[in-house]
Amino acid sequence: MLHDLVLGRLLRRLRPGQAGVILTVSVQDDFHALAIQQAARTRGYRDFHIVECDRISGRQSLSWRSHGDSPPTVLTSEGIAIPVGEVSVLWWRRVKADQQATRHAATEHERNLVNNDCCGALAGTLAAAFHGRWISPPDATSRAADKLYQLAVAKEAGFRVPRTLVSQSRGDVVAFAQQVGRAVVKPVIGAYGPFMFTQFIEDPMTIPVPSFEVCPAVYQEYIEGHRHVRLNCFGERMYAALLETDSLDWRPDLKIPMSKWNVPEDLARRVTSVLRRLGLRMGIVDLKLTPDGEPVWLEVNPQGQFLFLEPLVGEPLTDHFVDFLLSPAGDVPIDAEVR
């Protein structure tokens, strides 16, 4: 009741004409961006807008001047030119995508030019003109997406992390697999397109040497157990789901048993420490519980998917995230703030 009263007062302060705007940068038809926008507007907050980063080309999508002759603006998905200076919260959700208008470009060089310049102009305009609260800062988001860096930070914060190797050497991988007993492999970053699920690498000696040399990959020890935790962190609030499966990667099968999971206080403190060190105000964390219940850090996605869990575990994540964006609780302290 008290929470609703406080949030109601906050919403009244944030009505159009009285305060700033919430802006989301994402791709066209991004389900998360649209669902959160709709939820905010259902509450009466109209100043929630989306900038589609893949539709900059082909429209008068942005404007920035170095000497302040007119305010910098960006064009929303609804065709509204929003002054960047009026934006109070910027949800930096999906920011890297090719322009839809370049699909019919005559040459690869033309496509690259348009894609790069549209991306750079949008990022530059926002970096130069936005002075509100990032969810989360671009530099921190990019840095935290580095699987190797986040593993090192999680280890420093006291988490057990899987023993990990990144290599292009079959000999290194063979020796590593012998050391850890059973190993898995996954991409360092991945690519747009079909999902690349984590897989076992049973006998690396049977794989040709050139297959390893094509590009580095992440090799990790296999963590025993069948309980996985998907931890959704919005500011200092955490909402977790327990997923139970004997499969290595739970993502291909969402019919597995799922339920709400209470986050132990000690675990919450350690996760908060990691996110602050990474400079993130939100993060979707994947953990695995060993048979004796020890949580092992697998990774954090700075802008991971979370709404698919809402109907599966009965947690109102849409409302929780809107609360996070509209409330001062979203302005949690972070250690790696952009400087």
Image: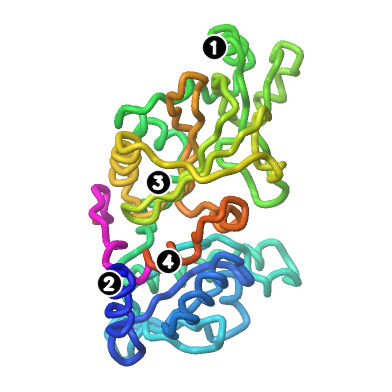
Question: What secondary structure prevails in the magenta region?
Answer: loop
Residue type pointed to by label 3: Arg
Residue 91 is tagged as 4
Q: Is residue 288 magenta?
A: no
Bin the neighbour count of mark 4 within 10 Å (Cα to Cα): few under 14, some 14-19, many 20 and up: some
The answer to whether residue 298 of the structure is visible from this angle is yes
Q: CA distance from mark 4 to mark 1?
A: 40 Å
Q: Secondary structure at mark 1?
A: helix
Q: Are marks 4 and 1 in contact (CB under 8 Å)?
A: no
Tell me the residue at 46%/88% (across/down): 81
142, 254: nearer the viewer: 254
Q: Which residue is mark 3?
A: 143
Q: CA distance from mark 1 to mark 2?
A: 47 Å
The first of marks 4 and 3 along the sequence is: 4
The image shows residue 194 at horizontal and vertical percentages of 72, 48
Q: What range is drawn magenta here?
A: 325-338
Q: Is residue 332 magenta?
A: yes
Q: Which residue is mark 2?
A: 131
Q: Secondary structure at mark 4?
A: strand
| Residue 40 against residue 123 in the figure, above or below | below
